[in-house]
C-alpha cells in the first residue's frame, strides 16, 4: 500500500475529535488554520471555540471592533494573526460578497493567507489537489525519505513542496492533508516518535538509517535580542490608572500597556531614572516602589524581555485615566495580563 493510503488509513483510525474536522465551511477552516499557526492544538482549541461563539460567521467577525478581536485573542500570541484575521474578514465581506475564494491561487491573495493556509482551505473545503507543508509535514517527509536539506532554506522549501505534491493523494487531498499533519503531530512527534508502532516502519528511510532523531534539519535561528522593560503602573488617589495603546508595526500593535521605560540593562537604582520617569508619567507628586523583586523573563521568538513592574502612587489627577475596575476590558499582551491578575486590581 502506497504512502498516501497508509497515512489516510492511520488517520481514520487515530485522528483526534476536533470541531473543525466536522465541517467544510471555509470560514471555520480558515479560522482554525490561522489560530494553529505556531500554536499547539491544546492551546488553540479554547480560542477557536471562543471565536466561533462570538463570531459565528465571517460577517460577525467583519463588523467587530478590532480591540474586541484582540481582547479575545489575548494570550495566543503573534497578534498580527488577529489583525490580519479581522482585516481579511472585512475584505471577504466587502469584496467577495461574504464568500471565500474557492481556489488555491485566489486564496493566496487574501491578507495573512500564505502557501500553507491556502493549500489547507483549498483542499479541505474544495477538494483541490493542493498539498500542505507545515512543521509536521516537513518532519514526516524528512524522516520518511531521509532528507537532510534544511527545511528553512530556499532549496528546502522548494524541495519539500515538490515532494509533498508527489505524495499527496490526488483522489482524496482533503483527508490526506489532514492525515499527514495529524500523523506528524501525534505519531511522528518531534521528540520520542512512536516508531515501534508506526505503519510506515518497513519503508521509512530515516528509521532504516537510524537518523530519525537528526531530522528534520533546520538552519540556525536568528540571534536572540535581550531587552529590559520597566512598566510604570500608575495608581491615583481616585483609584484610576493609565494605559497606552502601542502604535507602529511592533508585535503588540493595537494592544494596551502601562507606560514603558526601556533601559539597556536591568535597573539597579530607580533614582537614576527619576527624570526619565517624570517625563513619561507627567506627574508632579508620586512615589515609586518595585512590584516584582525577581525580574520576569518573557520569551518571544526573537527576543527576551526582562521585565520589572514599578508601582507609582500619586495624588495627582490623571488625564485620560481609567477606573481600576475597568482595566480587564482592554486587550493587553499576556505579560501585562499576568501582572494584572497578580496585582489583583
Image (spheres, rainbow, N blue to C red):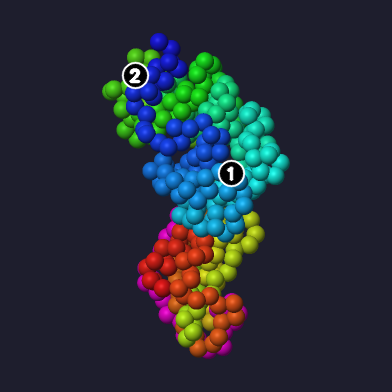
Q: Pointer 1: what residue?
A: 58
Q: Is residue 269 magenta?
A: no
Judge whether residue 160 can be spotted in this image: no
Relative to 222, does residue 10 appear above or below in the rendering?
above
* Image location of residue 46, percent across then percent down: 41, 47
Q: Is residue 286 magenta?
A: yes
Mark 1 surroundings: few (<14), some (14-19) or many (≥20) residues within 10 A: many
Nearer-N-terminus badge (2/1): 1
Picture quarter with the C terminus: bottom left
Do the CB atoms of the residues marked 2 and 1 lie less than 8 Å apart?
no
* Observer-nearest of 67 and 206: 67
State the extent of the magenta-drawn residues as a range.
Answer: 277-299
- Label 2, secondary structure: give it: loop
* Image location of residue 126, percent across then percent down: 57, 26
* Image location of residue 295, percent across then percent down: 40, 66
Judge whether residue 94 can be spotted in this image: yes
Which of the two marks, 2 or 1, is nearer to us in this view?
Answer: 1
Give the residue at x 55% y 29%.
125
Going by the image, does 306 lie left or right of 80?
A: left
Q: Pointer 2: what residue?
A: 199
Amino acid at each position: 500500500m502506497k504512502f498516501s493510503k497508509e497515512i489516510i488509513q492511520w488517520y481514520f483510525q487515530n485522528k483526534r475529535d476536533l470541531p473543525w474536522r466536522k465541517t467544510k465551511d471555509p470560514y471555520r477552516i480558515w479560522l482554525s488554520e490561522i489560530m494553529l499557526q505556531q500554536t499547539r492544538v491544546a492551546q488553540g482549541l479554547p480560542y477557536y471555540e471562543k471565536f466561533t461563539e462570538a463570531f459565528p460567521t465571517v460577517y460577525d467577525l467583519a463588523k467587530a471592533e478590532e480591540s474586541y478581536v484582540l481582547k479575545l485573542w489575548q494570550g495566543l500570541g503573534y497578534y498580527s494573526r488577529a489583525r490580519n484575521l479581522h482585516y481579511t474578514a472585512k475584505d471577504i465581506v466587502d469584496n467577495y460578497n461574504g464568500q471565500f475564494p474557492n481556489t488555491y491561487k485566489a486564496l493566496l491573495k487574501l491578507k495573512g493567507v500564505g502557501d500553507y493556509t491556502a493549500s489547507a482551505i483549498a483542499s479541505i473545503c474544495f477538494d483541490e489537489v493542493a498539498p500542505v507543508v507545515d512543521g509536521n509535514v516537513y518532519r514526516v517527509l524528512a524522516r520518511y525519505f531521509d532528507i537532510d536539506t534544511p527545511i528553512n532554506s530556499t532549496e528546502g522549501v522548494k524541495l519539500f513542496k515538490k515532494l509533498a505534491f508527489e505524495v499527496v493523494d490526488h483522489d482524496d487531498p482533503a483527508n490526506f492533508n489532514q492525515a499527514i499533519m495529524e500523523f506528524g503531530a501525534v505519531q511522528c512527534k518531534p521528540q520520542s516518535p512512536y516508531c515501534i508502532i508506526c505503519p510506515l516502519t518497513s519503508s521509512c528511510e530515516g528509521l532504516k538509517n537510524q537518523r530519525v532523531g537528526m531530522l528534520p534539519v533546520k538552519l540556525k535561528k536568528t540571534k536572540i535580542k535581550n531587552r529590559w522593560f520597566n512598566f510604570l503602573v500608575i495608581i491615583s488617589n481616585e483609584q484610576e490608572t493609565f494605559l497606552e495603546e502601542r502604535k507602529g508595526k511592533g508585535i503588540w500593535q493595537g494592544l494596551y500597556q502601562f507606560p514603558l521605560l526601556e533601559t539597556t540593562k536591568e535597573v539597579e537604582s530607580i533614582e537614576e531614572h527619576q527624570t526619565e520617569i517624570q517625563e513619561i508619567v507627567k506627574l508632579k507628586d508620586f512615589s515609586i516602589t518595585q512590584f516584582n523583586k525577581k525580574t520576569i523573563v518573557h520569551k518571544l521568538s526573537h527576543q527576551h524581555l526582562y521585565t520589572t513592574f514599578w508601582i507609582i502612587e500619586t495624588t495627582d489627577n490623571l488625564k485620560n485615566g481609567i477606573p481600576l475596575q475597568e482595566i480587564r476590558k482592554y486587550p493587553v499582551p499576556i505579560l501585562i495580563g499576568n501582572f494584572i491578575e497578580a496585582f489583583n486590581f
